[in-house]
Image (cartoon, rainbow, N blue to C red):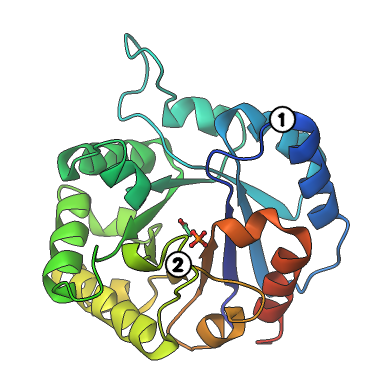
Amino acid sequence: MEKKIIIANWKMNPQNAEEALRIVKGIAGQRFSNNVELVIAPPFIYLDLIKKNCGKEIKLAAQNAGWAERGAYTGEISSLMLKNLSCDYVIIGHSERRYKMGETEEMINLKIKAVFKTGLTPILAVGEKGQNDDIIEALTRQVKSALEGSGASEIGRLIVAYEPVWAIGTGLSDTSDHALSAALLIRKIVGNLYGSDWAKDLPVLYGGSVSGDNARDFIGQNGINGALVGGASLELDNFIKIIKAAGTNE
Ligand code: PGA
């Protein structure tokens, strides 16, 4: 059975290293099913600390990466730097970066290419903004523009997170049926671009107000390969419940 991927997106939290350490030690101290790929995406400055304290089972993700490898890009962190820090994954195109930090689809495309080039795995976040938006238009545009110029062999490393923007941080999660149909749509879009063989193996996660109480509804679906968890990933008990829910799919 395919592993379920659970990613803790800490966003711009917590405010100090002691708290980061407390959370990661709390997670690392648990025994989880080996059916779960557990990934923590802390702010950049805690990556090294987390790496040293999370044990081999937990993988690291960055929440963003610059598109250039090195040079005059004040404030940026490159994929190569992240790789050298033993990061395996990078979240690209999170809606908070798109809509609060003004990231364009062109920037996201460059970042995805940089992550692929470095050999890391991009977690491409896509999703419609409003609940009544045209989801086919939004997902087609976001997926196509992000992947333009990337080859089929690279797509074999891609993960996509379906995150309807209206469900992020609102406590108003999507329904599992709708999330599943969005995941199928994403595979169809990727299939049209690269062929159905690549699309059928593409891991698609759901993100948006996932909690210990609803995680199983999403992760339990055959076509949903895991969850990208924001707020609840900072609450130890809540997050442990989510990871356990993913493990019960064995
Ligand atoms: P949320 O965030 O779980 O707090 O809704 C998810 C995300 O932004 O990835």
Instruction: Report if the CB atoms under discs 1 and 2 are less than 8 Å apart.
Output: no
Q: Which residue is mark 2?
A: 208
Q: Residue drawn 18% across and 45% down?
A: 105
Label 1 sits on what residue type?
Answer: Asn
Label 2 sits on what residue type?
Answer: Gly
Q: Residue drawn 36% across and 22% down?
A: 69
Which quadrant of the rendered structure holds the C terminus? bottom right
Where does residue 165 sit, x and y in percent of width and height?
Answer: 33, 62
For the residues labelled 1 and 2, the Cα–Cα distance comes to 25 Å
Label 2, secondary structure: give it. loop
Q: How many marks?
A: 2
Where does residue 151 sit, x and y in percent of width and height?
Answer: 22, 53
Q: Quadrant of residue 249?
A: bottom right
Q: Toward the viewer: 51 or 197?
A: 51
**Residue 164 in view (yes/no):** no
Considering only vertical position in the picture, is 136 above or below 105? below
Considering only vertical position in the picture, is 226 above or below 229? below
Mark 2 Cα within 10 Å, few/some/many (few <14, many 20+)? many
Direction from residue 122 to residue 213 in the image, left or right:
right
Label 1, secondary structure: give it. loop
Q: Toward the viewer: 43 or 37?
A: 43
Q: Which residue is mark 1?
A: 16
Marked residue nearer the N-terminal end (1 or 2): 1
**Residue 12 in view (yes/no):** yes
